Amino acid sequence: MEKLYKLFLISSLVLVYLVIAAGAIVRMTGSGMGCPDWPKCFGYLIPPSDRSQLDWKAEHEYKKGEVIIIDENLRVAPKDFKSNNSYSKENWLPYTKHDYAIFNPMHTWIEFLNRILGAIAGLATLLLLIVSLLRFKKDNIVSLVSFLIVLGMGFQAWLGKTVVDSNLLPFKITIHMGMALIILIFLVFLLEREKKFTKKLPSIPIFKSLIIFSLILTLSQIVMGSQVRQFVDEQIHLLGFKASTKWLEDAPFLFYFHRSFSLCVLFINLWIALILYKNKYIPIEFLSILFLIGLEILTGILMYYFYFPFSSQPLHLVFASLLFGAQTFFMIRVIKQK
């Protein structure tokens, strides 16, 4: 049972990171409205692959909830019915959540695969909860945290629906990302709880303070990065995906502050590295923190100086999420050390 619990724990953590990566790819490719409804996609469990599937058809059996596009507007079947030889608007209801009615097969399938990954991640966390309940007498905290994770995944799914219904309002996307980080905290907490450490970390007060402060800095960077991303999304909407050289021409002060602030994150962690070096023990998780900070700075440089090369944006977000997870793990270890 212990092996099964660890399997579902690691699987849940990996899948949540994959969902974050998939979400970043959705945003990079502009595929967020590839499925304009939720939880189905154009009213189908398996999304259409051709625009003709969304045209009105005569003598066709329509199911409740199926969607067609008429005059660049979405129409939804309110019940099961068979169409006549001519279109009758009385048989259809307008889709009222938003007015987006564009079908792009690439965008549709990218968004659909993102949702599939989310569903698999949700299933993995549910299995984690079931297995954790078998350990309730031994460790009830694990069961409680696993339950909170499942609740968080359900809430995250609902947030995903509100993002689609709002036609990708930037602040809702940011909230969606924030919830993913909260879920990561819970999963990392469970992962650290399974580890047994023999070597001691420095016990001086400044060390623990620096660890906590460095995590706060990273979280601040993620929040600022989300705000910068909102600005970039607006520029993409105005200028188009092909005008990447102009996206940051009129960047707000927040962008430059976010860019320079990364040096503060680096400096604090180099200070921590010096303390660890003097202690003659640098754990692998902290080496990964330094490595991820380097990757974050590198992808940031690529986006600014090389005009957002392909995959630099999702990689920047994934590295930030991995960094946040690694720092959370390290902080929990430091706090728990007696």
Image (spheres, rainbow, N blue to C red):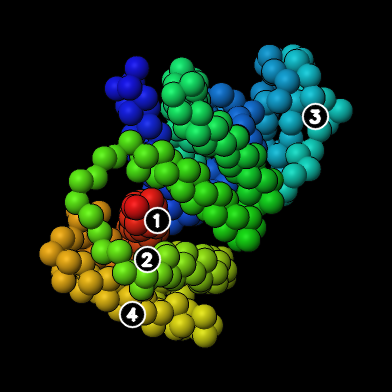
- The Cα atoms of the two marked residues, 3 and 2, are separated by 62 Å
Badge 2 amino acid:
Lys
- The Cα atoms of the two marked residues, 4 and 2, are separated by 20 Å
Q: Is residue 261 left or right of residue 90?
A: left
Q: Which residue is mark 4?
A: 263
Secondary structure of the residue carrying tag 4 is helix
Q: Residues within 10 Å of mark 2 (few under 14, many from 20)?
A: some
Q: Does residue 233 sit above or below 258 in this rendering?
A: above
Q: Residues within 10 Å of mark 1 (few under 14, many from 20)?
A: few
Q: Is residue 74 left or right of residue 313?
A: right
Q: Position of residue 293 (x, y in %)?
A: 29, 66
Outermost residue, front direction?
A: 338
Q: Which mark is residue 280?
A: none
Q: Which residue is mark 2?
A: 208
Quarter-of-image position of residue 148: top right
Of labels 2 and 1, earlier in sequence is 2
- The Cα atoms of the two marked residues, 2 and 1, are separated by 7 Å
Q: Is residue 191 left or right of residue 147?
A: left
Badge 4 amino acid:
Leu
Mark 4 vs mark 1: in front: 1
